Image (tube, coloured by chain):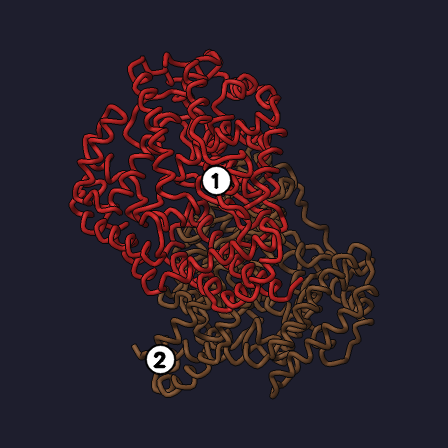
Chain colours: A red, B brown
Amino acid sequence: MDPKLEELKSRLQEANDIGAAGALLNWDQSTYMPPGGAAARARQSAILGRLAHEKLTDPAIGHLLDELRPLEESLPYDDDNASLIRVSRRQYERRTKVPAAFMGQFLSHSAETYTVWTQARPENNFALVQPYLEKTLDMSRRLADFFPGYEHIADPLIDFSDYGMKASTVRVVFAELREQLTPIVQAIAAQPPADDACLHRTFPQAQQTAFFEPVIRAFGYDFERGRCDVSPHPFTTGFSIGDVRITVRYKENDLSEALFSAMHEAGHAMYEQGCNPAYEALPIAGGTSSGVHESQSRLWENVVGRSRGFWTHYYPQLQAVFPAQLGDVPLDTFYRAINKVQPSLIRTDADEVTYNLHVMLRFDFELALLEGALAVRDLPEAWRARFKADLGIAPPDDRDGALQDVHWYGGLIGGAFQGYTLGNILSAQFYQCALDAHPEIPAEVAQGKFDTLHGWLKDNIYVHGSKYTAPELIERVTGGPLRVEPYIAYLRNKYGELYEL
Amino acid sequence: MDPKLEELKSRLQEANDIGAAGALLNWDQSTYMPPGGAAARARQSAILGRLAHEKLTDPAIGHLLDELRPLEESLPYDDDNASLIRVSRRQYERRTKVPAAFMGQFLSHSAETYTVWTQARPENNFALVQPYLEKTLDMSRRLADFFPGYEHIADPLIDFSDYGMKASTVRVVFAELREQLTPIVQAIAAQPPADDACLHRTFPQAQQTAFFEPVIRAFGYDFERGRCDVSPHPFTTGFSIGDVRITVRYKENDLSEALFSAMHEAGHAMYEQGCNPAYEALPIAGGTSSGVHESQSRLWENVVGRSRGFWTHYYPQLQAVFPAQLGDVPLDTFYRAINKVQPSLIRTDADEVTYNLHVMLRFDFELALLEGALAVRDLPEAWRARFKADLGIAPPDDRDGALQDVHWYGGLIGGAFQGYTLGNILSAQFYQCALDAHPEIPAEVAQGKFDTLHGWLKDNIYVHGSKYTAPELIERVTGGPLRVEPYIAYLRNKYGELYEL
């Protein structure tokens, strides 16, 4: 191998390995760390973060990338080495364009804002955090300006999580989705809500695990290269392609909680586990964007895990694990319960259908704030108005309105939310492609078999890691750009059977 | 504070924090890591180890230590800052005297030797590993020679784990102990062995934990600043004064295994937890030597945990947890079972009395090998002869003889073993001092109360971290040097009641 390419890989892997150690510090902090470890853990995480950043922004990497340009240009675009150089250059430029001093100020402002928000939200006191959020908006704009030449000021910020997904594209896609979704939500809201009392009986933790672990193993999550633990909020984290872990949170009076979290996180984790092993510890390993990542979690959680076919096979097993709780509950009642649609105030508790309305209003507010079309002080009122228009209800206070999510109060305004809904849209678009290639998949799912689906996802999506950008990958897999139709068709088909639409 | 002292602390804490992250990588590897994580974990550990070493040997630290000499000399010897500078200088000199290239060669030779040993031991093939061990001996000598001016060639190697404990001192102490111990062992071996069948019934893991966790909590182990997990070999590890964790290994057919390991590791962990919080992340935090560390684990495991007083209080509780297994076993039978003395081949399985004979023969072999008085090829035969002389039995093969312990096959020859027996000796010497100060301790132990003992250990030993060397600490606590008599008196008293001596 070219010695300069060898050196580039070695430097990038070293930085990655420091970052992976930092990720383990975080995993431990959320799973097993005793309370007394917190102060030292903050120091340990900070130093590893700084060391990884130093290694990744070392000018030596910039020189190597310059020297490797002829090699890159001599290779096909989708060659692994060409892709490595290309993706590494993109990341290097992104990291080095922002002055370290600015990033330091921004992180310290975020930390301060977060602390104020933890007080403001319970107090329902938007005014308290408003000046901080105004500064966040100002700093978000300044951050975007380190990447001149953008089409929309949100584009550089969207690039951080969904590279290549421009505000203009997402706006068009979301406008179309919203237009089609609001009448569906309103039609469902006018009908009696499904009865989900069966999910709120008492489900001991150990039996919940005994049910869902074999399910996600059957999906294709590899427990030899991962594990499932308990944490306050479910998440997926990886320290290598061979060690991608998930966590869940149990509620003994809510069967949905751990069960669907496990499927969701297993979807994220299988994406990471399925990456080409040759990309180990390199920037082309791991998922390519937050939207594509979310498409994999939502595909397994919703398209598969909340489907009638899946439960036709698994519901008798679930009843066998919980005979007292579910023995008297027919499959149809259970199926309606897990797919209950009802407008609600909190995004993270929202059902599959209304969820996107929560996301899209946040995305639109981000653009309006960045453009200057909406002032921070007007956000609470704008939130209530838009919520009423889209979901037919309005939050009685800011606590469950503009103060709801941590994202803006612990990070940027811009790029924070679009990935959730892009993921939902893509989950259906990718699944449709899998069906086109393998029409037998639904019948297999209804027999508890997932090999064909998992294999197709692995070969077409997982294996590529982040070699392709999300738009490139979508084009490659589906033969065209991101499209709303398959998702709308999926929702109409599924919920048309459950409700009158 | 002096800005140079501030800078020294900041540099040392940073290096410590990187090392602590490395320690978490190791903890995770032994407790929760899935098999697929192994390859990446080796890389992650290596890079953190290298970064910590680079920080600790940065010439800037040497300059700071030089510049801080006037400050150090202006302060009392036992001032915290003077001690920090003194201990840091000692460690800095030790780290910088050995060329990095030599350490690299040594570590790579050790790794190779370890791999060969994992094959040689099951095959009972000493000849296979002999040339590797000869090179280890040669490199151990060369390592010692980076520290000229020693009295005995083993001294610099002993300094790595038991700073200030010279070969000559240890040799005299061990000779005295051996002279007094062998007749005791022989007297006991001539009597019928205790019946320990009651420990080998079936003890489900969950109940074992339910019994021992409250015990070590009562000792003073703080679960808010630690936790207990399962690993293939029990160990203690800390990431800060606020996060010191232990592990145990369960055997359902051996009640002793997890129970006494938990007490042992809790002893190590309480030492680390009890350090002055002002020493957080500094070289003066943590135990001062392997011998003093072992004294704390053995004190809680043996002097307390295998005492009649302790079980007078706790045995009814143990019987309540295991009514079917122990309901018919009288306290006296149980007490004799946990204190069964019988010469055996394997060090790690040995009882409290014979254990030291295992350790001392290894220590003597280390000195003889380093001196050139014993050749590596003659080690297996020398092992059998010495074993027969000291324990009255001889290993039938090298697998359970000279090939038994990993220490020489994964590290140095020299300094590897003395700490175990120094710890046993010190456990009795320290405990005697605690009794002199608080004669009520045995009565309290017999009521399940450990506050007075724990408090005395904390104030006199734990709190000092490694501010004092082991010889300094012993002098300070006991008013004199390391002495064998209290340990022999303890053994004669305890085992004189159980056997005819």
Taking the image as shown, residue A77 lies to the left or right of residue B113, namely left
Residue B448 place in picture, x, y as percent: 44, 48
Which numbered circle lies on residue B4? 2
Disc 2 marks a residue whose amino acid type is Lys
Which numbered circle lies on residue A84? none
Q: Secondary structure at mark 2?
A: helix
Residue B116 place in picture, x, y as percent: 76, 61
Q: Assign the N terminus of chain A to one quadrant of the image.
A: bottom right
Q: Residues within 10 Å of mark 2 (few under 14, many from 20)?
A: some
Q: Nearer the viewer, residue B66 or A388?
A: A388
Q: CA distance from mark 1 to mark 2?
A: 48 Å
Taking the image as shown, residue A182 lies to the left or right of residue A245, namely left
- State whether residue B475 is above or below residue A435: below
Marks 1, 2: nearer the viewer: 1
Q: Is residue B257 visible?
A: no
Residue A488 place in picture, x, y as percent: 42, 24
Taking the image as shown, residue B53 lies to the left or right of residue A365, namely right
Which numbered circle lies on residue A293? 1
Quarter location, residue A397: top left
Q: Nearer the viewer, residue B175 or A369?
A: A369
Say which residue appears at 72% left-offset and 81% top-offset.
B371
Say which residue appears at 70% left-offset and 73% top-offset.
B366
- State whether residue B271 is above or below residue A498: below
Q: Chain of mark 2?
A: B
Q: Assign the C terminus of chain A to one quadrant of the image.
A: top left
Q: Secondary structure at mark 1?
A: helix
Say which residue appears at 53% left-offset and 29% top-offset.
A431
